[in-house]
Image (cartoon, rainbow, N blue to C red):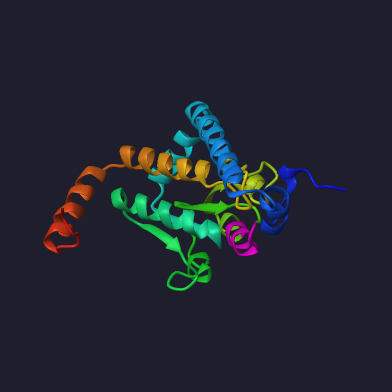
Amino acid sequence: MTMPENRLSSPHERFDARVQRRSAAVLKRRVIEQERRQLELALDWARDDDAFERVAAQIVAARRRFILGAAKSFTYASLLALDLSAGLANVTLIDGTIVRPLDVLSDVRSSDVLVAISLSRYRRYTVDMALQFAKAGGTLIVVTDSPDAPLVQHASERIIVSTESASFANSPTSVALVIHLLATLTTASAKGAGRRLAERDRLAESLDLYVEN
């Protein structure tokens, strides 16, 4: 029996169903058409979903902000942490090496927030740490791709994105939009964000960090 495409969990299954035995021209057209539809739907959804405002408010209100993701989700977590840290203090990416889950879990406070990015296939590393964080009294926010994802019922807020794709890889389009919106809304409402951004610009110029055209 052939599995429905929206239930294909592994890259190998998606490759067999969507990519294999198709010409490059046909595949490119299919992926572009799918991504165009995906972006249009994502923009309409994000415009009408007030979860973005609620999540941004919780991130701003927190004393410490931790960002978590594993495997491909670590890329998205890194981007969110980078953008948030431009306008807010106390933003920490849990990378498992410099900042380890054990270090964070041993000192969770009720004023802490953890944004966990957990996309299919759901890594046990992310799920286990996020559950322990919530159990310890921290506020858990989840960005995921299914209402049935492991962390949804344990989160104080959740943003559920669509990653449907014509490729063997799930689409990053909606995830990138979510990260961009959260960083923008959070920074816009954070006290002192403008001063912090201006100081970063001054320091970047002083340290000669960038090549100017």
Is residue 170 shown above or below 54? below
In the displayed orientation, state which residue is furthest to the bottom: 97
Q: In which quarter of the image is residue 10?
A: bottom right
Left/right placement of residue 6 relative to residue 185 reads right
Percent x, y for residue 56?
Answer: 43, 40
- Residue in front for this viewpoint, 209 or 129: 209
Q: Residue at x 22, y 48 (%)?
A: 197
Look at the image and tell me whether residue 109 can be seen. no
Is residue 109 shown above or below 176? below
Percent x, y for residue 6?
Answer: 71, 43
Q: Residue at x 65, y 56 (%)?
A: 122
Look at the image and tell me whether residue 39 can be seen. yes
The magenta segment is 122-131
Is residue 155 shown above or below 78? above
Q: Inspect the magenta stretch and tell me whether residue 129 lies in it.
A: yes
Left/right placement of residue 131 relative to residue 148 reads left
Q: Inspect the magenta stretch and tell me whether residue 116 lies in it.
A: no
Q: Which residue is drawn at 48% across and 58% down?
A: 75
In the displayed orientation, state which residue is furthest to the right: 1
Q: Which residue is drawn at 22% across and 50% down?
A: 196
Left/right placement of residue 213 relative to residue 167 reads left
- Residue in front for this viewpoint, 121 or 202: 121
